[in-house]
Amino acid sequence: MPGKVLVAGASGALGRHVVAELVARAVPVRILTRRSGGKALPGVEVVEGDALKPGALRGLADGVDVVFSCLGASVDPGAPGRAGYGAVDTPANLALLEEARRAGVRRFVYVSVFHTPALAHLAYVKAHEDVVRALQASGLDVAVVRPTGFFSAFALMLPLAAKGPLPVMGSGAARSNPIADEDLALVCVEAILGSGREYPAGGPQTLTRREVNAQVFAALGKPERTYPVPLWGLKLVAFLAALFHPRASQFLRFMVGLSEQDLVAPVKGQRTLGEALKARASRAG
Ligand SMILES: NC(=O)c1ccc[n+]([C@@H]2O[C@H](COP(=O)([O-])OP(=O)(O)OC[C@H]3O[C@@H](n4cnc5c(N)ncnc54)[C@H](OP(=O)(O)O)[C@@H]3O)[C@@H](O)[C@H]2O)c1
């Protein structure tokens, strides 16, 4: 059993499940959050701070055994903040690393992105892998979790499909195996409590983009309606969006990359996307 675990990104889609799993195992937890006055789980120590503010993390890792970070800019284009991933994920996590080294933390577990070498140059992937390189050069005991897409990201398609047709990017034939946020949290806890270095993680079903669209409409109980979008058109939109919304532009460029090739990670999850989407759709009414 480790000592205290510091969770950065604890209010996020993945982080909240990781915190819950650690608390369920009676692991002492400290969280970093920018949200003030939020309700924390019993036994969780809350530290407010913005990792991008100089000096904000000083003392944060004192007494901490393992740092776990899933801190990063959102993949939801509608979320606040337009700065690109290299201006958020990389400097914020490097600041965490600096604080971890200062405090003498034993292990650092970081959530990057499952990808192929052909996607490594894309800004979204590079922002994460720049952190990985710094961690691996730090001399700390480091583990990297590399997930495919989270079910929570696919759930963003539900309100769009409720209102109209969904786009099919390119041929729609590229395959991937998304993973439930809850299942990925178990992988993260395994990495926090264990001693491995690499934790690639995907879900149990490998689906084409067209099959994902079909599952979104099935979850809503609506007939499937789609329209084709050529990848060159998306590349053009991403190019133009870079001028006013770098984060959305970089994630769109990553989506184009995913539409051009298969991305299938070792199966670690058990939950299926269709069931998760149905549950979310019925919760949303
Ligand atoms: N979602 C996916 O499909 C997917 C797939 C592969 C990899 N990933 C990666 O996995 C990680 C977690 O993803 P997620 O979907 O759980 O992210 P998320 O829901 O957007 O949560 C991100 C977390 O980072 C925190 N954060 C951001 N900037 C911060 C700052 N300057 N100081 C302190 N905290 C800050 C946010 O806090 P606030 O609540 O204050 O905003 C939030 O708790 C990300 O690095 C993401 O790129 C995601």
Image (cartoon, grey):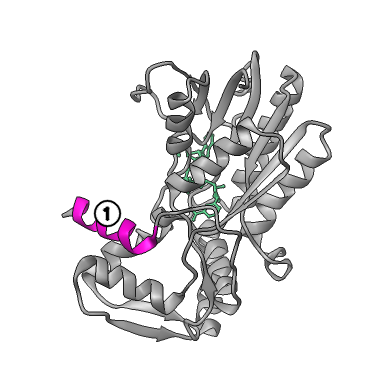
Q: Is residue 126 above or below residue 70?
A: below
117 vs 278, nearest the viewer: 278
List the residue tagged with mark 1: 280
Q: Position of residue 29 (x, y in %)?
A: 51, 21
Image quarter in which the C terminus is found? bottom left
Q: Tell which of 193 and 10 is nearer to you.
A: 193
- Look at the image and give the residue range highlighted in magenta: 272-284
Q: Residue at x 71, y 51 (%)?
A: 129
**Can you see residue 52?**
no
Horizontal placement of 21 versus 108: left or right?
left
User: Is 160 above or below relative to 22?
Assistant: below
- Mark 1 CB near ligand 1 (8 Å cut): no
Q: Secondary structure at mark 1?
A: helix
Where 84 sits versus 144, above or below? below
The extreme top residue here reads 63
* Residue ID at (49%, 70%): 206
Relative image position of residue 18 (x, y in whole percent):
48, 35
Expressed as whole percent of the image width and height from the top left, the position of residue 172 reads: 47, 81
Looking at the image, residue 214 lies above or below residue 148:
below
Residue 13: x and y, percent? 43, 44
The residue sitting at 35% across, 59% down in the picture is: 156
Q: Amino acid at mark 1?
A: Arg
